[in-house]
Structures are given as structure tokens and as C-alpha cells.
Image (cartoon, rainbow, N blue to C red):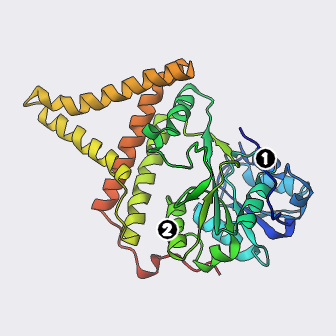
Amino acid sequence: MGAATATQPATRALGEDVLVAIPVLNEAAHIETCIRSLMKADSRISRALFVVSDGGSTDDTRGIVSRLMAEYGNLKLINNPGRLQSIAVNLAAREFGGDRRVLVRCDAHAIYPENYVLAVADSLLSRGVASVTTPMDAVGDSCFQRANAFIVDTPLGSGGSAHRGGKVSKFVDHGHHAGFDLKSFLRIGGYDESFSHNEDAEFDRRLAKAGGRIFLDADIRIAYRPRASVGSLARQYFNYGKGRARNLMKHGDRPKPRQMIPQAVLLACLLGFLVAPFSPWGLVLPGGYIALLALASVAVAVKMKSPCGLLAGLASGVMHMSWAAGYMRQMLSPPRLPPEAAARPAS
């Protein structure tokens, strides 16, 4: 993993400038490691405020955070009755934003480099942008998780998203959320709390409409562990697909070409299986797709010098088909949302 910063920013954030929001729900396995890693920074970090927003954990998450509060005087724990991450971040911003200038969002199960929070704040303030996003580098423990990590940061996995393992710093229309100008975040209403998934992309769409600029800082990187089982990966991407469809429907946008490929592949495979009982030619489309995934698996295994790479095609196929199914499900059965389903004001 690269260093948190490559060069010293022209503008450095004061500790008092920074609010860190950490949404949690049953994160006892990760929360202590997360908090301790975030606290590893220069002396400014002691004056930053960390708010853990708990959505009703039934494990020892709250107990662990409470114990750490005795060690870190700048750590707080609040309740999040709405449970969703979008609501958790909004709560922290509304209740503890005060005169602070920077909101940093952190996820309990991610792996953060030393000085991460301050690097994000420095990057945001030095560039004068509304949001800073960071690349994510996937890592894995189990064999399927490693295969997932091998493929997710490639075009065959994520479709070429800039924040998935990206190496170039640039302005983007969306990325993995890291830091926000707090006034800008509150001004446009924070996250849309009716979104359980894809709330980040929906926020970025409104931010762009309001004239806010989003910068991907490739010198600030985080490692994360993708889903470790086929079932959990399928559920994750099904919900991602639903969220993306809701986002497009809300804003009246057209999907990007790369976002239509999974639906086209799913429909082609379904059509092929329907035709197959009447003609073997029907298997050409699904057979070709499976062959592509098999070739990708072999290529990944060879490149990574790991037999776990042979599962990369399976992981990729699960991502594609689940995302497409969720997208199509949402488009065919749009929710009947009240007018106030647009982002609730965060201040």
C-alpha cells in the first residue's frame, strides 16, 4: 500500500477542522483495529472529533467503542435508529459538525494507512474542492476472497471504475467517499436517507449539479476486504444494481454504456437457455460467456501465481449477473416513493 501522502499539501488542516463519521453495525471483529489505525497520525489528530454511529449492534461493538472512549478523549458513540450508513453519516454531520470544515467518512471494515484522516483533510483543503475520493485496493484472506480481490479492481470486475485500484489522480464524477467540505455536504442535504445502497453515487450526482468538484487523490489509498462467499457477494451486487437503477431513475439520467453490458449479457444468456431445448445454437451465447470467464480465471491464476485465481471468473460472473438482476428488478418494479424521498435536509 502506498504512503498516505506523496507531497506536503500547501494547506494543512487543523485538528479542530475535522469531523470523522464511522457508521457501524455488528463490527466487533473490526472496529478496534479500525479506530486504532485512524488514530495513528501526527499530533493534530488528537483535536479531530471521531463519531461512531451505531445502528443497533447486537455483538460487542458498543462495548469495544465504549472501552476505547476511555483511551481516546476525542471519540464519541451515538445511536443510529435508522440503521443505514447514509443516516449514520448525516447524524454525525448534523449533530457534531459545528464550526468544523471537513467531514471524513470511514468504514469500520476497511484498512487505513497511517495519517489517513489528516491526509484526506489536507488534500481537500489544499485543492479547495467539495469532495476528495480515494482508490480502494482489494485484498483477501480466504481463497474465494483473494480471487474476488484479484478480479474486482479490473475492468472485468468493476467495469473500469477509476476508484477501483486507480493509479492516477484526477477530477472524477464519482469515487469512493473519503472527505467532504462540510458546508457543501450539509448545503445539498447530505445523503439521501431513503437509499440503502448507492447513496454515495446519488450524493455525487447532486453535488455535481450544485457545482461541486470531486477529486480522486491516488496518493491516498485504502485496502479493503471484499465479500468472502458467493452468497454474500451476490447479495451485495444485487443491492448495488438496485441502487444504481434508483439513482438513474431519481435524476432522469441515462446509464453509461458499461452499465448496460451486464444486463445485455444476462438477457443474452437467458435467451440462449430458452432457445437451447429447440436448437443447440442457443447455447452459443451462454457458452461463450462462460468460456470468457474461464479464460479470465486461468489468466488471473497465471498472473497472480495463485491457484485461487481459478475462482476469479466465478466471482466476476456473480458480480455481473447479480448486479444486472438487481438493476432490472428495480427498473421493472420501481418503488412508490413520496415526494419527500429526495434527500432530507441535513441541517
Choose top left, top right, bottom left or bottom right for residue 104: bottom right
Sequence-wise, which precedes: disc 1 or disc 2? 1
Q: Residue at x 54, y 31 (%)?
A: 150
Q: Secondary structure at mark 2?
A: helix
Helix, strand, or loop for circle 1?
Answer: helix
Q: Is residue 101 above or below residue 289?
A: below
Above or below for 9 versus 37: below
Q: Is residue 201 left or right of residue 4?
A: left
The dot on residue 239 is none
Residue 192 can be seen in this image:
no
Q: Nearer the viewer, residue 51 or 6?
A: 6
Quadrant where the N terminus lies?
Answer: top right
- Above or below, 222 against 305 in this view is below
Q: Tell how many labels.
A: 2
Give the labeled residue for mark 1.
Answer: 32
Q: Is residue 305 above or below residue 63?
A: above
Q: Residue 60, image x and y in percent?
A: 74, 49
Give x and y (percent) for residue 138: 60, 38
Graded by Cα atoms within 10 Å as few (under 14), some (14 to 19) or many (20 or more), the crowding at tag 1 reads some
Residue at figure coordinates x 22%, y 33% from the top left: 285
**Discs 1/2, front:** 2
Residue type at the position of mark 1: Glu
